Image (cartoon, coloured by chain):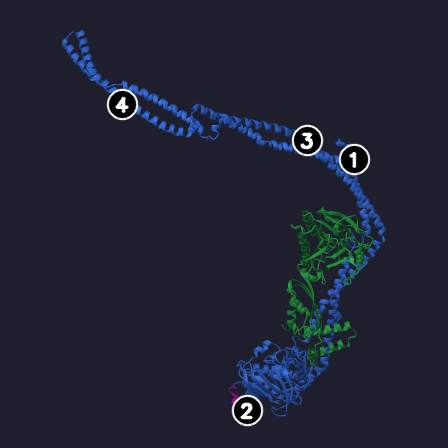
Chain colours: A blue, B green
Amino acid sequence: MRLERVVIEGFGPLTAYEAVFEPKRLNLVIGPNESGKSSFASAVVSTLFGFASHEAEALARPWSGARHAAAVTFRAANDRYRVSRRFDTHDVEVVRLGAEGEAAVETLFKGSANPRGRSSELERYEELLRGWLGFTDERLFRESAFVHENALETEVSPELRHLVSGAVEADYQQIQQALLARLDLLTKEHPFDPRSRKRSNRSIESRTARLEELRTRRARAEVVLSEVKSRQKEREELDSRMRELRADLAGKEQLLADLDVWVSLREEQRKLLKRAPAIGSELVNARRARNAMEEIDRRISQSLGYLANAPEEVEPDLVRLGMLRTQRSRHLKSVEVERTKLEATRPVSRVVTMGITILLAALSAGVTYGIWKQLGLAAGAMALGAVLGLIISRVFGQSTEKARVMGEAQVKMVEENIRTLSQEVDQIEIRVNPFLAGRTLEVVLADVKQFRAASQERREHAAVMHSLPMPDRLEAESREIDEAVGSLRSKEKLLLQQSPFLAPFKEDPVKIAESSDRLKRETMALRTRLASAQEALDGVLRRGGPEGDAENLESLDEAIAGDEESLRYEMKHRDALLVALEGLREAVHEYQEQHVGRIAEKAGATMARITAGRYGSVALDAEFHATLAMGGRGAIGIDSLSRGARDAFYLSLRASLAQELAAREPLPLLLDDPVAHLDEERRGTLLAFLEELAEEIQVILFTHDRRTLGQIRAAHVVALGALPKGAESIPARVEVRP
Amino acid sequence: MSIRLLHLADLHLGATFPSLGERGEERSRDFLSAFLRAVEYAAGEARPVDFVVIAGDLFDTHDPEEGLVAQVEAAFDRLEKAKIQVLIAPGTHDAPSYRRSVYRRLRLSDNVHLFLSPTLEAGPRVSVGGVSVQTYGIAYDAAVCERPLGEFRPLGLADYHLGVLHAALEDSPTWKRRSNDLPINRTEIAASGLHYLALGHYHNFSEVREGGSVAVYPGTLEGKKFGEDGPRYLVTATLGRESISVERTPWNQRTLTQSLIDFQASDLSDEAALEQRILAFAGDRELARLRLEGPSTFVFDTERVLERLAPRFFHLELDDRTYVVNARLLDKYREEATVRGVFVRNMLERIERAPDETARGTATLALRIGLAEFQNPRHAS
């Protein structure tokens, strides 16, 4: 396949762009970065194959709003074709062209060819692709026809293995490893190499072993089961013996239980009957207390009823009232006395004073005269007596006045006291008036005391009553006891009727205890016999499983069925993996036989021609490690080549691989700027090589590096965007089309 | 004049689920929870039932662990407090004939009657609100396996005769009977004279009415294995003068689903579409087994899909039976001058040459696995 013309209506950044290529010369697509070189290459692939995903399609929509469409004209075998595609509708038209020009001779296909769908139209279109290329896988075209920017620096053998595997995610070696890893989970066996057999069991071996064990266990369980069946008679005998023993045991246990019930019935009766006298005396006490209380209540209601609602303070009030009244009467009495006294104390009158004076003067004069019988003396004494009489009556008159004033003050004070007392008496009297109501204070006080005493007594009786159940409750309890005893007696009677053997022990606790012991011993013995019978039965039932127990056939069957199903699944996958691994190995082998020799041969021929016979031939081993034969020096590895020679070698290998993969006709080699990072010398060597290679296979070199222009000898240049500076210095033999 | 009974069977308490991996224990707990909820229902204040009947396989094994046994005992105590009579007939999984049988140590309250005879025997005659019920039951014993209804005749007069059996109905076309099952058939049911046969053993609900007798398999309360799909029911029966009615209440907490994704009938174009299709069944209560069938137009890796989608289910199984016959896809590769091209060519040849169906299946699967690995994006990283 050789590309002749690419017409882009709209594709990413490219609008109304046309490029023409030469089939047998180096085509150089030159444009600055971001000028759309990648979009241009992508447009070629997408026109032929369509978009494999919505995302890719969306990314390539024209920025300008132009129609999303492109057409590619190419030569395949001896015919020229044009494929036009509208990306938005997936409409594709394929026409065969005449030997020259763009005139259609025949329309080969017109319809929808969306690789994301399924249709007969698409199948027809893919048939055409297969005819031109030998394959229909877009990815294979993209990866084999394209040589990427940094491809020269990649390792050759993995890259080649990847390409020959079908340009897939992994090369065939990795795929084989992945299949082996999956197989390894299933089995320890190795398909190719018995020495790689693993030591430990994998799923299939473990499952097989487990199944074998399960089947053995099942077989054993079946054997034992048939044995058990054959010992059915023995088993039945044991069963019936056990039934008898159980019945016997049940009888004995019933008797023992009856005995227990009977003993407990009697015990309950005894307890109940013991309680009866206590209830009687409690009843007497309760009744007595109630009577006493009733008597007190009667008494109170008869004579002391008026105090029933008296507050606690009445008593102190009454006592104080008595006291206050006594005090008041005492004070009244003393006032009376004082007043009397006061009235008696009169002021000394002048007459008295005169009298006393005269008396004393006369007395003194008389006495003096009597003694001395002198009138002068008697007159002097009389004067003296008069003066003395005046002094005495004065002094006496003063003290009497004092006593009178004091007496009056005292009377006032006492009267004040009496008023205060009277006020308090009035207050208290108001409070206690309802209880006095015509009674004397002493009577009421005595009543209050009596009332207190009666209340206290009543409280005491009430406490006694509260400590005892209410008499009617006691009476009810007494009735209940009578009834319970009655029912116990009737139960006992019934029990004695049912178990007549109890009768002899009726009144003899020793006999009861002996009988109970005997029964216990007998039941114990029966239990031992039952246990040994059970053991014998177990012996018959024992079927040699784990812990001597039988195995459940149904569970075993289910386990076996589950494992068998899983094993079938795993073995099917193991077999398929083995077949796939074998098929892959055969495919690799076959591929190497059919193709690798040819690839090496072609690459060798290219190398020999380009290097003027310096490198004679190329050999590729099973893992695509390449060696070159150099005249006289034997095989040398590519690592020992110069970098220029290594680039040339890589590209010649890629070119021959592109020819081989295309099967029908060599694909063009589209190189995405592999020279960008090379130094000038290496770039020169590479460009020279590409010019040579272009004679065998169409080469389209995309580059942004204008220095390339200066280094090429003969090329067809396609400018993408504005021509770079320096384009004017392109040698004349380089044909430039804008 | 009617009595109501809760009919349980095949509870399989203590069952283990190794195929569910770490989810197995949770599933075990689902089974216990379903039983305990049923007991709570029966012991409810409204007194919805008079009897609880357990027709075998209460436990998944004859020797379950102690903790479980204690929980079951507590459940029976709960029923005793509610004064509900319980009848238990051991089944094939918990047969009492083992030395270490749980029924030798299970502490039974007074309200529980355990049938231990390997032949159908009369149990207690119970009176509920003036209605008398004569009970009968049988304990499964692998060594006996005689026809339990063969010679059976009901005993004396009672309003109702109720039988509890873990037995296999012979003439059912859908169920596989094993040689060690207790066999019964429709004729025997009709002639049994039993008003209600509370059956257990088959794990899906089924009701048989023959000659005045009603025989019911209630099925499991939680699906134990695939085939026990969809809703599981709590079954209650009302035995009335006129008729016997059976009611079902959905009871399961998780659902088993088996479904088919047919590539022929559907428009699946890639792995992502397939995943979306599978996710339609997703849910943390779902245990799904999906069978992929028909021709696939694209290559996908079942293991990869399973790994990605399993967390969206309680449990997911994919049974991949698809085959790549899509001519376009294979044609796309077979002509290639690549290892893939040769591989596809060789495998297609191998499929064609295959001597039998098995070999063809293996080769088809090999082609699928191989192609899926060629396209495994895991390798790209």
Chain bearing tag 1 is A
Q: Is most of the magenta stretch helix, strand or loop?
A: loop
Q: Under tag 3, what secondary structure? A: helix
Say if mark 4 contacts mark 2, CB within 8 Å: no
Report the span colored magenta.
A723-738
Which residue is located at x 75 percent, y 38 percent? A258
The numbered mark, 3 or 2, whose residue comes first in the sequence reads 3
* Mark 1 vs mark 3, CA separation in Å: 25 Å
Q: Relative to residue A315, is residue A232 depicted above or below? A: below
Residue to which mark 4 is pinned: A405
The reply to whether the C-beta atoms of the residues labelled 2 and 1 are less than 8 Å apart is: no
Mark 4 or mark 2: whose residue is earlier in sequence = 4
Confirm whether residue A492 shows in the render: yes
Q: Nearer the viewer, residue A374 or A385?
A: A385
Q: Quadrant of residue B358?
A: bottom right
Q: If you read the primary sequence from the N terminus, does the residue marked by circle 1 or circle 4 appear first? A: 4
Q: Which residue is mark 3?
A: A273
Query: Where in the figure is residue A727, as x and y percent of width and height?
Result: 52, 88
Mark 3 or 2, closer to the camera: 3
Whole-number angstrom distance, CA of label 4 to CA of label 2: 167 Å
Question: For the residues marked 1 and 4, what is the alpha-carbon distance in whole angstroms?
Answer: 119 Å
The residue type indicated by label 4 comes to Val
The residue marked by circle 4 belongs to what chain?
Answer: A
Check disc 1 and report the residue beneath it. Answer: A500
Label annotation for residue A719: none
Q: Is residue B145 part of the magenta span, yes or no?
A: no
| Distance from Cα at disc 4 to Cα at disc 3 | 94 Å
Which residue has dot 2 on it?
A731
Amino acid identity at mark 2:
Pro
Which badge, 1 or 3, is on the more N-terminal residue? 3
Distance between mark 3 and mark 2 Cα atoms: 143 Å
Chain at tag 3: A
